[in-house]
Image (cartoon, rainbow, N blue to C red):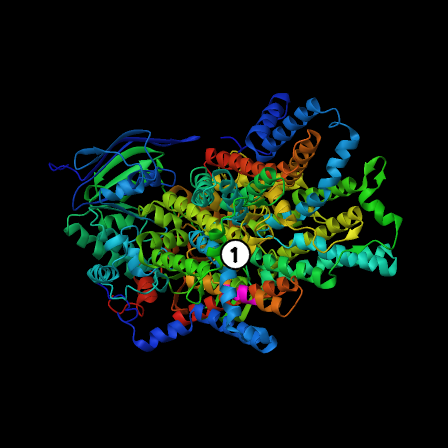
């Protein structure tokens, strides 16, 4: 048999692994995060307190949880634009059930159930009816928000019973760590294990990388995509639950000012390719923290809330440019 | 096989009827047309007010802003790119044009500045997307934030009309031969760009670069220039929308236009334009815009809770895409 | 033919699509340890049959038997469960996953809680790859491999599932001669292991080299099944085309005229210091193996890749990096990748044909629809492009007709020289003959034709002068067909790449 050129050696040495880590996407994001923190450290004295960072982690928990679902979906090459509206659906449902059943757990269960319900509908429309997910979920972004408007008449729904435990859980800590963040991190770890260590997770990457290949290899593409839509909406529902815990009321406009765009921005910042199949959840976590830290730092500096938008947008362009640069370097290094 | 007929089809009433039936039942435009017609008939029966010149004028004026932006967006989407920043443009152009008008009392200058902003933002979008190679959805989402921030940076309150230029107020509220000016702008822009897209070489190039940029390059088409023109055009038409909106609101508001981009993009997609480029229809966009406006108008006329407007917009997008997906599957395109 | 039960037996399989009967009651059988070739022109129904066996399509009628037992495939998973593996023409690999994950795609070894057993995965992959003579790190991303290596990964994938039936769809379309040889070695090994191989191809010489039996389909019908040893090549062609193709290569050389195209020490991409001339009325071919740079040459000349050196058309310099300039001066270029570089799939036949020339029918950018339609209709007529109308979307046309439409695109321009890169890749025998006739015509009308090809018979059959390219450099020139033998050209093209041969 003709000799076929030999590739790299079977096991890479330590130095190679280190250089791989150093040149990874995530390393770039860590540097970006440190730069942002350092910048605010210099510019704004109040960011030198530890408390600020614990608060930050509490505040970004809903975004982080929602971003897990969006990441998994985007890795498979699909989108969900409706997560902002999901926040309101979950919040309003939860509080409505609080009031009607006078049972906290019934309310929470009902609120969380909206996730699989909406996700299931998306999954059906995309996998069975072959609808484009971007447009489908754009439609449900409007449809869900509108239903909340109709049901609440654009009035916040207040918790008439007063489930204080529900609200306390949001503000309580486990050791120094805010409870919502503990929940978020647990979910991140779970998702990370699923994505990197299980057959399901590897199949998600395979679908995003080459859907036809996945299909002909006997991977049940439709089933996996369906599950991802359910997971994504469920993550958004958990995020919505946290937002509801903040105030104890269901707000009709929760997530209404572009929550989906902020989350997608964080995910893209984290290096998940729009076309699917590429990126890691660690990147997403870093993306969420970077955007959250930027917003918080500017807020503490008393910068106009909306100048924050400009900065956020600029960071996004910078990061995506960084990623495409990284890809080019990676190709060069491979040669 | 349906949808595959010759340009040189035979003439005569029979073939004309077959073609019309085919258009109605087997194209996105046709299906939209049927839906619009059905709702118009329903509303005419249900409400005395609906089919009156006044109401139709109101209906079309209200939608003219979305429609004008959607015209640019149709061309951009066909060329394979997208612009999500048009929502923030409504605020940004609004506050700046109003302040220019207040300070100079010069209408021509105000409008020129407004259109120039459209060109500039379009150029920035183009440079980020085409030069830096960042996916235009991401690039313009970032610009959505940046432009909104710029609007807020410019003013932290709304800018009232202190110039009292009558002609400016006419832009959004006046009539010409009984037709509201915004409707005239809307129809004129639609007709011009329908012609540009279907009858000119530029329109052909737009389709080509969207369908296959590599093939277009090898055919000697300046791909980046064509896409850049699409971005600039979308920016300028978003500015035109913003100026009409400004005139109707009579004040420049830094928070206006949130979600406007989704409505415009939604209408274009509803009209049958493909997200993957190369395929699209200006007529479809027109019908989609009219459909969305009719639903909103009908909800008001039938005295239904106005919150239903948002729900119905969403549902109609889903239904239309569903119909389109089924049609494509029947034709074996997937 | 055999007393033993066939591994796979398909009986009277039928499948219709809107507007076409893709398969009309065809039979096909495959025995253990056999290579059974399936050939036919485009549209004969080969790929439909593959997709039915793969479980992607369900037949309207007919029976699929595995070792005598009737089965039904509702999804690819069902087909895989019967140890059938299709190696598709377009490689089904996931670029960002590791080699090992690609080999075991959809079939990863698992530990508790359905987690991946990485040690097992890498160990088994190494083993499989070594069996195929491929000594590479299974943790590397698949994108780091050459096309030939990726093909072997596909076969490793089949072996990882202990496939007893392997279907290869045009497996050599992207391979060089030496890579084809090693593929054949692997196939013979598999044969020895008792695997049945269905070999789908339209390269007849390969069928003689590797297959035991051959089946011919035409227009969805089963035409013949014969032992390869008992069939003549001309029979196969007749069965495929349904008529006798007397003269596949109709080249009638004329008198070469003035120099049209001068390529002078061009370097860039993988090409170094390459020169050639094309005269009026002449067909010049550049022959090279896959990876020799032969395809880059077209892009360099046309100005679609950065280059140094000079390219002149009728003495006028053609600017690098501007296809527009090349076209304006009378140079056209048909790429080797029709789908990715040529066709505008969502657009009509008319819009595809007039893509380059549309400015000729426009006044102040406004297109004169009548002129454009008339010009298109003439081309459709002249090239006998089979289409229900010029408004038909080009994606519905067959490969041969798509290729003709792309040529038509250039015929509407007043060209001096047209570059054909792989003019007949992926098109059937009937269309091939037409394509060559067309090139001959164009040369007789005074155009210069430059052919870039990796197919030896084609180069020998059509060219007046041949230049061999090896590792980006010129490796010999031959004046006419009579001068050059297959042996000469192959030696020149391959000798340094593959010292063994």
Whether residue C234 is visible to the viewer of this picture, yes or no, is no
Residue C166 highlighted magenta (yes or no): no
Q: Is residue A189 left or right of residue C232?
A: right
**Foreground: C375 or A143?**
A143
Q: Which residues are magenta?
A: A289-294
Which secondary structure type mostly characterizes the magenta part of the structure? Answer: helix
- From the image, tell me which residue sits under label 1: A263
Picture quadrant where residue B302 is located: top right
**Foreground: B6 or C190?**
C190
Q: Position of residue A216 (x, y in %)?
A: 33, 46
Circle 1: element type: helix
Q: Residue at x 77, y 39 (%)?
A: B183
Q: Position of residue C460 (x, y in %)?
A: 37, 56
**Foreground: B225 or C244?**
B225
Chain at tag 1 = A
Q: How many marks?
A: 1
Q: Position of residue B63 (x, y in %)?
A: 71, 41
């Amino acid at each position: 048999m003709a000799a076929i050129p030999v590739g790299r050696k079977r096991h890479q040495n330590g130095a190679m692994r280190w250089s791989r880590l150093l040149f990874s996407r995530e390393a770039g994001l860590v540097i970006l995060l440190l730069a942002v923190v350092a910048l605010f450290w210099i510019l704004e004295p109040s960011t030198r307190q530890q408390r600020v960072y614990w608060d930050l982690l509490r505040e970004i928990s809903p975004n982080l949880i929602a971003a897990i679902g969006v990441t998994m979906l985007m890795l498979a090459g699909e989108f969900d634009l409706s997560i902002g509206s999901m926040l309101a659906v979950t919040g309003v449902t939860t509080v409505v059930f609080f009031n009607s059943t006078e049972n906290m757990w019934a309310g929470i269960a009902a609120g969380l159930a909206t996730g699989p319900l909406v996700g299931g509908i998306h999954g059906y429309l995309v996998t069975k009816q072959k609808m484009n997910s971007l447009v489908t979920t754009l439609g449900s972004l409007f449809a869900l928000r509108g239903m909340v408007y109709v049901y609440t008449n654009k009035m916040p729904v207040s918790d008439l019973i007063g489930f204080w435990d529900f609200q306390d859980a949001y503000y309580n800590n486990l050791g120094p760590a805010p409870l919502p963040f503990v929940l978020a991190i647990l979910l991140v770890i779970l998702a990370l294990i699923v994505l990197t260590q299980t057959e399901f997770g590897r199949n998600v990457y395979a679908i995003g990388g080459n859907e036809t290949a996945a299909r002909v290899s006997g991977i049940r593409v439709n089933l996996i995509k369906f599950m991802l839509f359910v997971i994504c909406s469920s993550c958004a529902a958990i995020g919505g639950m946290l937002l509801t815990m903040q105030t104890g009321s269901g707000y009709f406009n929760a997530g209404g000012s572009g929550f989906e765009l902020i989350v997608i921005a964080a995910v893209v910042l984290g290096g998940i390719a729009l076309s699917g199949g590429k990126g890691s959840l660690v990147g997403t976590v870093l993306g969420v923290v970077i955007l959250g830290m930027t917003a918080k730092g500017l807020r503490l500096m008393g910068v106009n809330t909306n100048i924050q938008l400009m900065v956020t947008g600029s960071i996004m362009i910078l990061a995506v440019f960084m990623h495409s640069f990284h890809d080019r370097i990676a190709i060069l290094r491979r040669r | 096989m349906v949808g595959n007929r010759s340009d040189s089809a035979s003439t005569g009433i029979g073939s004309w009827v077959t073609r019309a039936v085919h258009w109605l039942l087997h194209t996105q435009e046709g299906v939209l047309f049927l839906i619009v017609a059905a709702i118009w008939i329903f509303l005419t029966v249900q409400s005395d007010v609906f089919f009156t010149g006044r109401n139709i004028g109101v209906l079309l004026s209200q939608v003219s802003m979305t429609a004008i932006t959607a015209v640019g967006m149709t061309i951009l989407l066909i060329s394979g790119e997208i612009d999500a920043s048009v929502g923030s443009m409504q605020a940004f152009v609004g506050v700046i044009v109003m302040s220019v008008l207040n300070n100079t009392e010069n209408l021509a200058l105000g409008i020129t500045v407004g259109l120039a902003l459209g060109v500039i933002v379009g150029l920035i979008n183009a440079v980020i997307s085409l030069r830096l190679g960042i996916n235009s959805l991401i690039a313009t989402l970032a610009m959505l934030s940046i432009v909104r921030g710029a609007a807020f940076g410019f003013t932290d309150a709304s800018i009232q009309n202190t110039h009292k230029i009558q002609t400016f107020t006419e832009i959004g509220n006046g009539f010409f031969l009984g037709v509201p000016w915004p409707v005239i702008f809307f129809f004129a822009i639609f007709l011009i760009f329908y012609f540009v897209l279907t009858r000119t070489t530029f329109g052909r190039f737009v389709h080509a670069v969207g369908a296959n940029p590599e093939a277009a390059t090898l055919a000697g088409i300046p791909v980046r220039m064509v896409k850049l023109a699409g971005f600039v055009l979308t920016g300028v038409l978003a500015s035109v929308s913003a100026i009409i909106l400004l005139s109707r609101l009579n004040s420049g508001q830094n928070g206006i236009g949130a979600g406007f981009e989704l409505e415009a993009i939604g209408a274009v997609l509803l009209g049958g334009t493909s997200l993957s480029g190369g395929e699209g229809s200006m007529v479809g966009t027109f019908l989609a815009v009219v459909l969305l406006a009719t639903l909103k108008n009908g909800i008001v006329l039938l005295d239904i809770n106005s919150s239903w407007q948002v729900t119905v917009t969403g549902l109609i997008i889903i239904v239309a895409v569903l119909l389109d997906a089924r049609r494509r599957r029947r034709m074996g395109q997937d | 033919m055999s007393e033993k039960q066939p591994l796979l037996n398909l009986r009277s399989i039928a499948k219709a699509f809107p507007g076409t009967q893709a398969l009309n009651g065809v039979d096909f059988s495959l025995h253990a340890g056999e290579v059974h070739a399936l050939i036919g022109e485009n549209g004969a129904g080969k790929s439909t049959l593959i997709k039915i066996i793969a479980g992607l399509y369900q037949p309207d009628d007919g029976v699929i038997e595995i070792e005598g037992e009737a089965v039904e495939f509702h999804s690819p998973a069902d087909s895989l469960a019967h140890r059938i593996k299709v190696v598709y023409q377009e490689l089904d690999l996931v670029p960002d996953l590791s080699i090992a994950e690609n080999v075991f795609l959809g079939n990863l070894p698992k530990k508790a809680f359905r987690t991946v057993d990485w040690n097992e995965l890498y160990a088994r992959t190494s083993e499989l790859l070594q069996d195929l003579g491929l000594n590479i790190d299974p943790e590397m991303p698949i994108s780091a491999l050459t096309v030939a290596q990726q093909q072997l990964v596909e076969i490793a994938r089949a072996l990882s599932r202990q496939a007893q039936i392997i279907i290869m769809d045009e497996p050599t379309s992207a391979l060089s001669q030496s890579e084809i040889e090693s593929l054949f070695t692997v196939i013979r090994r598999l044969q020895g292991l008792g695997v049945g191989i269905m070999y789908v191809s339209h390269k007849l010489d390969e069928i003689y080299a590797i297959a035991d039996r051959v089946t011919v389909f035409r227009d969805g019908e089963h035409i013949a099944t014969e032992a390869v040893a008992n069939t003549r090549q001309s029979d196969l062609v007749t069965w495929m085309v349904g008529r006798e193709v007397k003269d596949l290569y109709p080249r009638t050389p004329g008198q070469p005229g003035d120099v049209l195209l001068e390529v002078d020490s061009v370097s860039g991409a993988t090409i170094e210091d390459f020169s050639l001339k094309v005269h009026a009325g002449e067909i010049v071919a550049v022959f090279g193996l896959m990876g020799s740079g032969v395809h880059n040459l077209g892009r360099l000349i046309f100005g679609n890749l950065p280059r140094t050196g000079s390219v002149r058309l009728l003495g006028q310099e053609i600017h690098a990096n501007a296809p527009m300039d090349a076209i304006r001066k009378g140079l056209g270029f048909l790429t080797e990748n029709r789908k990715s570089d040529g066709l505008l799939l969502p657009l009509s036949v008319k819009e595809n044909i007039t893509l380059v020339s549309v400015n000729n029918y426009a006044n102040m950018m406004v297109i004169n629809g009548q002129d454009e339609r008339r010009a298109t209709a003439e081309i459709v007529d002249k090239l006998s492009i089979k289409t229900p109308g010029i408004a038909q979307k080009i994606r519905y046309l067959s490969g041969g007709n798509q290729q003709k439409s792309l040529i038509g695109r250039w015929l509407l321009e007043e060209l001096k020289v047209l570059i054909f890169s792989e003019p007949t890749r992926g098109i059937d025998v009937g269309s091939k003959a037409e394509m060559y006739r067309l090139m001959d015509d164009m040369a007789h009308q005074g155009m210069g034709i430059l052919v870039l090809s990796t197919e030896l018979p084609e180069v020998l059959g059509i060219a007046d002068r041949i230049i061999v390219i090896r590792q980006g450099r010129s490796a010999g020139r031959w004046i006419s067909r009579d001068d050059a033998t297959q042996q000469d050209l192959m030696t020149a093209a391959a000798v340094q790449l593959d010292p063994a041969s």
